[in-house]
Structures are given as C-alpha cells and as structure tokens.
Amino acid sequence: NGGGKTVALKSFGLMALSPRLGLPCNASPPVKVGWWDVGVCLGDGSGVGGGSTMEWRLRRYRELLAGAKEGGGDHPKLVIIDEICTGTSYNAGYAVGRSVIEGLLNETDAKTGFIVTTHNDDLKIFSHSHADITSANTRGTTRKLNYGVWGTSEGLEAVEREGGWGDGFVER
C-alpha cells in the first residue's frame, strides 16, 4: 500500500523489454535483462459479462502458466503478477497463489523468471522459506528493493496518509 511494488514491477517489465526494442538499459548493480516474452497480470480485467475479479485472474494465471511452459528455445520468458491472491478470501487466495507459484517453479525451465507481489502474509512466509525464491520489499523513502526480507502491507498507514476520513476512523 504505497510501498512501490507495482511501480517496481512495471519498471522491471519495461527494463526487461528494452534490449528487445533496441533501447539501452541502465541498472546498478547489473541485472539480467532481455527476456524475449513477458507475460503480465496487472490490474483487474473483470467486467459485466466477463466474470468476477477472481475468475478473470484465474483465466490469466492459466494463460501465463501455459505460456511459460511452452518451449521457448533460446528465448527466456518473464512472468509478472501483481498482487496475486486478490479477488477472493484470504485462505483461497493463499491456496491459489501458492499453486501458481509452485507451477512456475516446477513446470517451467530455468530460462523462465517470475516476479510476484502479494499482501498475503502466509504467501510471504512460504516464499521467504523456499530456497528457489528471493523475497524483497520496497519499504522506505528510497523505494529501493530490499532483498531477503518481506514487508508489511501497512493498510492503516495508507488510510492515515490519504486523510479525510474523520476523527477516529483508523482507531475504529
């Protein structure tokens, strides 16, 4: 909530595609860039007749997993999912999110990278304890990635930052 997760994802996606478009990419420290295919799940594609947020996300996750599993030859793939687990209950979101991440880990080749954000604390614990996943947060005024730790969602702090809710709103 205001920590910079979505901005970081969008920036990384653009940086990953820049070499393919012939654009220079300045990163410090140097990072691997130049994924050939970038699959993205950002926002909410639901609408009248299109199903719920969760139904839209389930379809998108299935498409991303199928695309990541396809043989890419020499072309690395990158999957970006912003706020996995949204659109349903906390426990169902955790189960779906963990299954999607395990699918990316177990059903793709080493040339597939993925970046996933979440507010689900159980999914943060799972990812932090998994040897093949690096956790990070974007806390602080610099919005730099801090590797090896996960952040809190700070929803009530976001309410206070936005203001205008009246006396006692946060306390209630």
Image: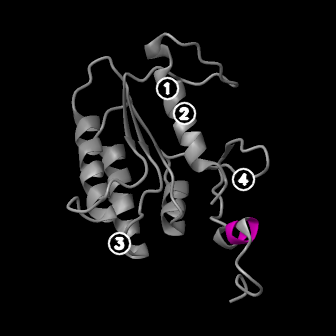
Depth-wise, is mark 2 or mark 3 nearer the camera? 2
Q: Residue at x 45, y 14 (%)?
A: 21
- Distance, label 4 to label 1, CA atoms, is 23 Å
**Residue 139, labelled with which disc?**
4
Label 4 secondary element: loop
Q: Residue at x 64, y 48 (%)?
A: 4
- Distance, label 4 to label 2, CA atoms, is 17 Å
| Magenta residue span | 157-161
- The residue carrying pointer 4 sits among few (fewer than 14), some (14 to 19) or many (20 or more) residues within 10 Å by Cα, namely some
Marks 2 and 3, the one that precedes in the sequence: 2
Image vertical order of residue 108 relative to residue 6, above or below: above
Which coloring applies here?
A: one colour
Q: Which residue is mark 1?
A: 16
Q: Residue at x 73, y 74 (%)?
A: 164
- The amino acid type of the residue labelled 4 equals Arg
Kindly tell me whether residue 72 is visible in this rendering: yes
* Callout count: 4
Kindly tell me whether residue 135 is visible in this rendering: no
Residue 124 inside the magenta-drawn segment: no
**Residue 83, labelled with which disc?**
none
Label 1 secondary element: helix
Q: Which residue is mark 3?
A: 92
- The residue carrying pointer 3 sits among few (fewer than 14), some (14 to 19) or many (20 or more) residues within 10 Å by Cα, namely few
Marks 4 and 2, the one that precedes in the sequence: 2
Q: Are marks 1 and 2 in contact (CB under 8 Å)?
A: yes
Q: Which residue is mark 2?
A: 12
Marks 4 and 1, the one that precedes in the sequence: 1
